[in-house]
Amino acid sequence: MVGADTAWIIVATALVLFMTLPGLALFYGGLVRARNVLSVFMHCYAIACLMSVLWLAVGYSIAFGGGTSGYWGGLDKMFLSGIDADTLSGTLPEVLFFAFQMTFAIITPALIVGAYVERIGFGFVLTFSGLWMLLCYAPVVHWIWGGGMMADGGIFGEIGVRDFAGGIVVHETAGLAALVLAIFLGARKDASKPPHNPGMVMIGAAMLWVGWFGFNGGSQLAADGGAAMALTVTHISAATASLTWALWEKIKFGKASLVGLVTGTIAGLASITPASGFVGPVEALVIGAVAGVLCQEAVNLIRNMFKIDDTLDVFAVHGVGGIFGTIMIAAFGQGAWVAQLGGLAVVGVYTIVVTVVLVKLVGLVTPFRVDAEAETTGLDLTQHGERAYDITS
């Protein structure tokens, strides 16, 4: 099965990169106003490039290095030192495992983009994203996936934190960082206008859905029944959450929207992510059914009750979804309550602290928020000298 495992993870690696480029870029790009769509594309594309280089330089070593510390992996695998085409990680070439994990390191800071679109400086985006990936994301990866302090036998006992594909590692960290950034940035001058291109949103969501098969199915790191089950439950949760989101929207507002339907898809995908290696189709149906309503209510809570302009609802959809799915692992008897809740708490506090510190420090060297004139004109023209369309909205 070694050859089959390698072939599947090569495909899965391409699928996870496809989630960011072009999936997430189109999903987020359609949700903003026309005068900011290119800035969203620029953020996603540039983050993908920068994270790739940083993951090679030091990120992979921090996450999966051979150091004995429970806190980080050390620096012994910087620039893939000591690794060649014949070096194995389990049944996989380690260079392939590196590439697969690199796509996760790309999409996690890219998810945060949705919180700050339409009002943030490009220099801040790159500087913050690079430092955040190295200082927040990579250590958390080591704690849970790299044999660190939250793995089996670690600080939570014999049964450590269960997170199959990133409910804590990806979605909680990105969601909380997004919330912190949105709070520090403050609201947009005008947050009233709807998405400029709902069709683009749907296309991006569809690409994310397809790419998520590599995200969750690939996390099995083998071409076997476990990967097939992870793929299947991922699809069931996404489909169910799409329907419950649309139904709840219809009940509350009298109409079910396309943007709502596909946002439900993402809520279902985020929620099943941590549990996809531990549950079956019926449990996935339950997770998806709840996620479609839960995440929609979280959107209302953040936007309307707390008045936080997390522009594209990153925390409500990804953060809440990932946290919910992580808890459901214990609820279905596939993980320990102490480990699941403790892991969420420790990573949550760590993420908030690191994000706050980085916002303060990076803001000292590069502008955090653009000025009022740039925000009114749009980031496409003021930050990048380009327009997506002949007319703006």
Image (cartoon, rainbow, N blue to C red):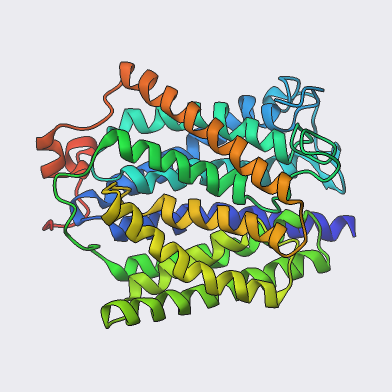
Up-down relation of residue 90 to residue 322 (above or below): above
Q: Quadrant of residue 62?
A: top right
Q: Is residue 393 left or right of residue 3?
A: left
Locate the N terminus by quadrant. Answer: bottom right
Q: Residue at x 72, y 51 (%)?
A: 337
Whether residue 207 is visible = no
Q: Residue at x 21, y 56 (%)?
A: 33
- In this view of the protein, which residue sits in the foreground, 117 or 268? 268
- In this view of the protein, which residue sits in the foreground, 109 or 45? 109
Number of marks in the image? 0
Residue, far right = 1
Whether residue 27 is visible = yes
Q: Is residue 392 left or right of residue 179?
A: left
Q: Is residue 1 left or right of residue 341?
A: right
Q: Is residue 243 left or right of residue 236?
A: left
Residue 242 place in picture, x, y as percent:
47, 75
- In this view of the protein, which residue sits in the foreground, 341 or 193? 341
Residue 347 place in picture, x, y as percent:
59, 37
Q: Quadrant of residue 254?
A: bottom left
Residue 380 place in picture, x, y as percent:
22, 44
